[in-house]
Image: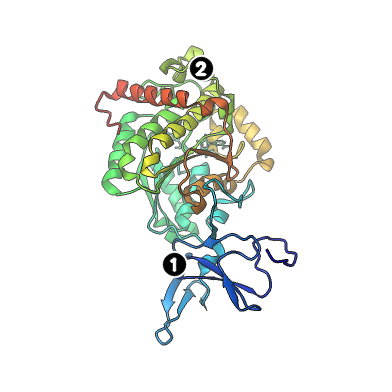
Amino acid sequence: MMDLPETDSEDEIPPGWEERVTTDGSVFYVNHGLKSTQWTHPRTGKKKFVSGNLPFGWEKCVDENTGKIFFVDHENKRTTYTDPRLAFATEEKEHPYDLRQKFDASSTALQILHGKDLSGQVALVTGANTGIGFETARSLARHGCKVIFACRNMDAADEAIKRIADEKADAAKNCDCMRLNLASFADVRSFAEGVIEKYKRIDMLILNAGVFGMDYSTTRDGYETTFQVNHLSHYYLTRLLSKLLGKNSRVIILSSESHRFANLDINNISPETLSPLETQYWSMMAYNNSKLCNILFANELSRLWEGRAISVFVVHPGNMISTDLSRHWWGWKLLFLIVRPFTKSLQQGASTTVYCATARELSGLTGLYFNNCHICNVSDNAKSSELAKRLWDISADMIKAKIGPEACLQ
Ligand SMILES: NC(=O)c1ccc[n+]([C@@H]2O[C@H](COP(=O)([O-])OP(=O)(O)OC[C@H]3O[C@@H](n4cnc5c(N)ncnc54)[C@H](OP(=O)(O)O)[C@@H]3O)[C@@H](O)[C@H]2O)c1
């Protein structure tokens, strides 16, 4: 490769060069000095391409006299011959896992979505009325995505959508709230039936709702609440919505680094350890185990659905982010408050979810765990395919035990 002047960014085009794009989206490079063109970036040697819709507010037009294509930015009232998607061109990968880290712990969900037009796509976010789920839903809706707010409290969901409307009326038009109580299989089932009746496809299924640090309680179905809300009902919901998920759909499951402290393993997994009696219950361990279940479920789901080209990703959003998660005990509330200056903002907490739901470079990948918008290793137990398979079967049996064989598990 030729000697090039120093620059801060290896992506920067050297002086005398210009980046252009063909109508089919391939990026090429023009050297004005040598009057030559090439497909590879003069600095990195890599090929790039652009795909997808134009950014929000842009339109592609053809000059009637010259036949030349130009682009109009209606929001800023500008016209240019340069395809605006060039700013978001993706490098051709030699290997599917060849991912350059573009975002980190400080990135926000809206930075990740910058320039993305998600019109025509449908996302379903559980627990979208508050916390990380709200920031996720709000960010997607602001970029044109239709978002189903799957919430147990309709007043809270309406209030959340009103907050979005106060900020950007158009974004609120993309929000649809539907009632979902994850503490009841019957509710999960009627919610899923409602979604299937109303929607033809889901592009992003975001399993975000969760509870933490609760006193012992059981659901309407008689299972321990943390386990059913965080894992079992999400498992059931995903299987019920299976027919709405198709090629390129993504399932994103909110887990946590807490999964590393779970005590669930292949020797003790059973309905009794997953949903313990009050005498065996410790809220912290119930949460850790439910977050391990989230990863095991994702692993088995990604394996079973690989042939359907559906991507399944698991996310750790950040540590002790100031949300309502700590609401069940004053001690947690105090601790979350004390660490607040050092933790991620809600926008930063939603970034890894939004990245996994929308990043083009993740197409074709599945069964991965992300922290700070980057692939990370999980605990040894979370890697166990045997444990994942056992959890899958036990989960199905536990649902059938309450609903009967007609549980509609697809
Ligand atoms: N905050 C953190 O530091 C952190 C760290 C690691 C992982 N996470 C994970 O991130 C996810 C989101 O947590 P968050 O911090 O945003 O918590 P949050 O503010 O408490 O939000 C939790 C959401 O889940 C909903 N939910 C709870 N029980 C439900 C039920 N039975 N049916 C339907 N929805 C229910 C809540 O609805 P209501 O408002 O009606 O209760 C709320 O919308 C969770 O899965 C959590 O485990 C969070």
Residue type indicated by callout 1: Asp
Q: Return the residue nearer the eye: 383 or 137.
A: 383
In the rendered image, residue 385, in percent from the top left (x then y), is placed at 47, 27
Quarter of the image for the C terminus: give it.
top left
In the rendered image, residue 260, in percent from the top left (x then y), is placed at 58, 27
Q: Residues within 10 Å of mark 1 (few under 14, many from 20)?
A: few
Mark 2 or mark 1: whose residue is earlier in sequence: 1
What is the residue that sits farthest to the front in this orientation? 1
Label 1: state its secondary structure. loop
The answer to whether residue 246 is seen in the rendering is yes
Report the residue at 55% width, 69% height from top: 28
Quarter of the image for the N terminus: give it.
bottom right
Residue type indicated by callout 2: Tyr
| Label 2 – label 1 distance at C-alpha | 58 Å
Q: Work out whether 195 lies above or below 16.
A: above
Q: Return the residue nearer the eye: 96 or 404.
A: 96
Q: Work out whether 275 lies above or below 69.
A: above
Report the residue at 65% width, 32% height from top: 335
In the rendered image, residue 255, in percent from the top left (x then y), is placed at 52, 34
What is the residue that sits farthest to the right in this orientation? 6
Q: Quadrant of residue 406?
A: top left
Q: Residues within 10 Å of mark 2 (few under 14, many from 20)?
A: some
Report the residue at 45% width, 44% height from top: 128
Number of numbered callouts drawn: 2
Q: Work out whether 127 lies above or below 43.
A: above
- Report whether 394 appears left or right of 405: right
Colour scheme of the rendered structure: rainbow
In the rendered image, residue 159, in percent from the top left (x then y), is placed at 44, 48
Q: Report the disc number at residue 24.
A: 1
What is the residue that sits farthest to the top in this orientation? 279
**Which residue is identified by label 2?**
281
